Amino acid sequence: MKWISWLIVVAVLCWSGPASAEVEHVFGTVADAVSGEPLADVRIWADDDSQLSAADGGFSLATMATHLIVRKPGYLPQKVPVSFPLHLTLQPITPKALYLSYWAAASQDLRNHLLQLLADTGMNALVIDLKSSRGDIAFRTDMPLTVEVGAQRSRTLKDLPDLLAELKERGIYTIARIVVFKDNRLAKGRPELAVRTEAGSVWEDREKMSWCDPFREEVWDYNIALAEEAARLGFDEIQFDYIRFPAKSDLLFSRENTGDNRVAAINGFLARAQQRLAAYPVMTSANIFGYICWKPKDQKIGQRLADLAEYVDYLSPMLYPSGFPHGIPGYRNPVANSYAVIADSLRKAALLTGLAPQRFRPWLQAFRDYAFDHRSFTAAEINAQINASNAGGSHGWMLWNAASRYTQAGLQQVIPYGELNLVDASPKAGDSTVLSRSESKPQALPTM
């Protein structure tokens, strides 16, 4: 029987030895690729360890991984092979983006026009619809549920890998927009996942679109799986939109509709997405209501600003002046005060969260006003918003036009403050005050 004991010892050594030998202490430094300065708080991620770089850019991990994911807000993410030592550099990026809508993507002429605008104006980023608010998915995916609910009936990005390759060649930062809980296809194809009326029927909003219940983890996993596909395709960033509850109180969900429950659901979705996307060289962002920048509570939609920042790299408030129909404190008419709306909202958001300005990248208005005087947003209005975003130090900006129709006016160069000729008399560079405030009494912010 002695030989059996020896076999057991040899087997244990053979089983335990290689695993121990594979664990390596990986160390190195990370610096800014342009300035050469060391970078602190860079996330160095392996599937069995994760560390933040120190003030001198140094880091060390004990890992069996063959590759590391390296990311920091304000920089392009990387996937790097393990070597000894690792001296990494990260390329800074400040996205200045146009939006390519789901249906606009089907037009080669319109896509070419946007690419030419990016080239002519020095802009460097494109937000691309991968999943629309109808729940349609723009590219081919093997996810069975998308077929079951008919989400791939109208694919508008049949050449997505080729498009991404072209954008990479042009140096364009690519952002995949995924609409999450407003999903007519999934809600009607799987009604047990839908938001319901008090009478028990599947609810529809004013656009006759149905929504999915944000408490349902099946809905979380469906959207996160799609985000993972986008990450594998090579997008630089995943942007989640409609990560909220409908702004209506008399609806039924699978859990009690309380403030704490709503916030926990939205945070839970983003936390799971963060965990699942950690293995990819991709950044994350969340689109949020503009008024959320002004309120510490969730406004009955589950978005609490200070919480959201923990789970994404960037917060993208939709700061369209037309989107503040009740005004903001000090301004009754936001479309006549475009600079102030952006500047004050970003300042308020930073105060509520304690975050650096670089953690915000706002959506700006590039469409006709619908709430006040119905003015067209031309070069003056667009540049007022861009100037405010730049002056506030935000991580770039994105222009929204639902039809993806833009002109070169207002994009090619920033109009100096003194030449804007706006009602709000936007402040000059370096002036930390907001000039020519409305003389009217500040208005209370609405509930949403």
Image (cartoon, rainbow, N blue to C red):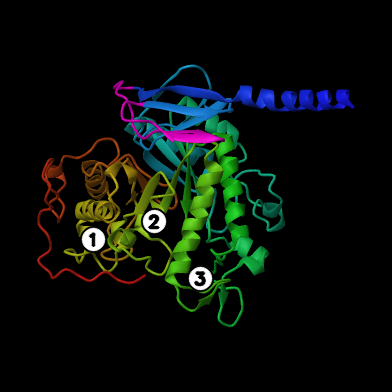
Name which residue type carries label 2.
Asp
Q: Main secondary structure of the magenta part?
A: loop
- Depth-wise, is mark 2 or mark 3 nearer the camera? 2
Would residue 215 be counted in the magenta stretch? no
Frontmost of labels 1 and 2 is 2
Question: Which badge, 1 or 3, is on the more N-terminal residue?
Answer: 3
Q: Secondary structure at mark 3?
A: loop
Picture coordinates of residue 375, whole percent (x, y): 27, 58
User: Going by the picture, which residue comes out furthest to the front?
Assistant: 2
Q: Which residue is mark 1?
A: 334
> Which one is earlier in the sequence, the residue at label 2 or at label 3?
3
Q: Which residues are magenta?
A: 34-57
Q: Residue at x 82, y 23 (%)?
A: 6
Residue 360 is tagged as: none
Point out residue 17 in the picture as x, y percentages from the top left corner: 68, 23
Residue at the farthest bottom position? 199
Q: Quadrant of the C terminus?
A: bottom left
Answer yes or no: do the residues labelled 2 and 3 have beta carbons within 8 Å? no
Give the CA separation, mark 1 to mark 3.
26 Å
| Side (left or right) of 130 relative to 356 | right
Instruction: Residue 307: give its label.
Output: 2
Q: Amino acid at mark 3?
A: Asp
Q: Tag 1: residue type? A: Pro
